[in-house]
């Protein structure tokens, strides 16, 4: 079981801020492919991975990172703080 | 060091005064404040979203690095989230060091990192609709100088 968080336009496209999923995917990219195959709104949100960032347990990560041990995964566009 | 991620407005004058008064051993204090730009009068509000938990972790790590690299005697970051009107202060950074060069450099470092590595997202609300502020390539490139 892994908690997924979505922020900014990723949250808007998917239509919810968080959810928990069961997955057997080995990597972040594998999980993204599972989600994109599930419903159109996920496919739209994850259409361009270069426009997205991912954080694993609140640390910036990458799409080829392994999922083993990760409890919280967040997807969002490049940050615009300051 | 103090970090506050908050929805409420902050008093720039009071924060700056208190920071300087507490800057024991420092000879220089630098403060920076970011405001909501008015966009020629068309902006009705800015909505700032953040990632509670990661925001605090990421900024605390940046502040610790700044403190170590420039031997800061103190540092302060206040960053707001929620709905802000044009002209309101979004955030402030204050740094204190023995000499001014370190305080200026550390403040710029913190600003560059807050822009691109603190999980905030800004949305502009205008009469024409709403739009997420796009991250700029220059902001990402600015990190390479550190």
Image (cartoon, rainbow, N blue to C red):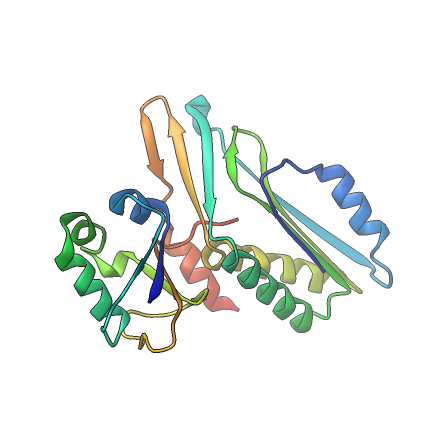
Q: Nearer the viewer, residue A57 or B128?
A: A57
In the displayed structure image, the side of residue A30 where residue B14 appears, left or right: right
Residue B119, above or below B13 = below
B43 vs B58, nearest the viewer: B58
Report x, y in % for residue B108: 59, 57
Q: Position of residue B76 (x, y in %)?
A: 69, 54
What percent of the width, then of the height, locates residue B89?
60, 37
Question: Who's the residue at 34% across and 31% down the image?
Answer: B130
Could you say which is closer to the camera, residue B115 or residue A53? A53
**Location of residue A19 (image quadrant):** bottom left
Q: Residue at x 41, y 61 (%)?
A: B141
Left or right of B96? Residue B48 is: left
Q: Residue at x 45, y 36 (%)?
A: B47
Residue that appears at 39% across and 29% down:
B125
The N terminus of chain B lies in quadrant: bottom right
Indicate left or right for B131 with B77 as reference: left
Taking the image as shown, residue A43 lies to the left or right of residue A17, namely left
Rendered location of residue B63, percent (x, y)? 63, 63
Circle count: 0
């Amino acid at each position: 079981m892994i908690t997924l968080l979505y922020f900014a336009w990723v949250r808007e496209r998917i239509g919810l801020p968080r959810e928990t999923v069961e997955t057997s995917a080995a990597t972040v990219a594998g999980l993204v492919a599972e989600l994109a195959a599930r419903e159109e709104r996920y496919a739209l949100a994850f259409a361009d991975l270069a426009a997205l960032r991912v954080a694993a347990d609140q640390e910036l990560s990458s799409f080829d990172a392994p999922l083993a041990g990760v409890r919280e995964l967040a997807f969002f566009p490049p940050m615009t703080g300051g | 060091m103090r970090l506050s991620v908050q929805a409420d407005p902050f008093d720039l004058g009071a924060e700056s005064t208190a920071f300087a008064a507490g800057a024991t051993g420092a000879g220089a204090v630098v403060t920076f404040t970011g405001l909501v730009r008015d966009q020629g009068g068309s902006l009705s509000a800015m909505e700032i979203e953040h990632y509670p938990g990661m925001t605090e972790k990421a900024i605390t790590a940046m502040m610790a690095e700044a403190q170590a690299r420039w031997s800061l005697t103190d540092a302060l970051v206040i960053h707001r989230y929620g709905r802000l009107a044009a002209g309101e202060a979004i955030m402030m950074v204050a740094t204190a060091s023995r000499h001014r060069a370190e305080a200026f450099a550390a403040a710029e470092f913190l600003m560059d990192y807050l822009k691109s590595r603190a999980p905030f997202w800004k949305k502009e609300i205008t009469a024409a609709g709403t739009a997420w502020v796009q991250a700029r390539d220059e902001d990402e490139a600015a990190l390479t100088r550190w």
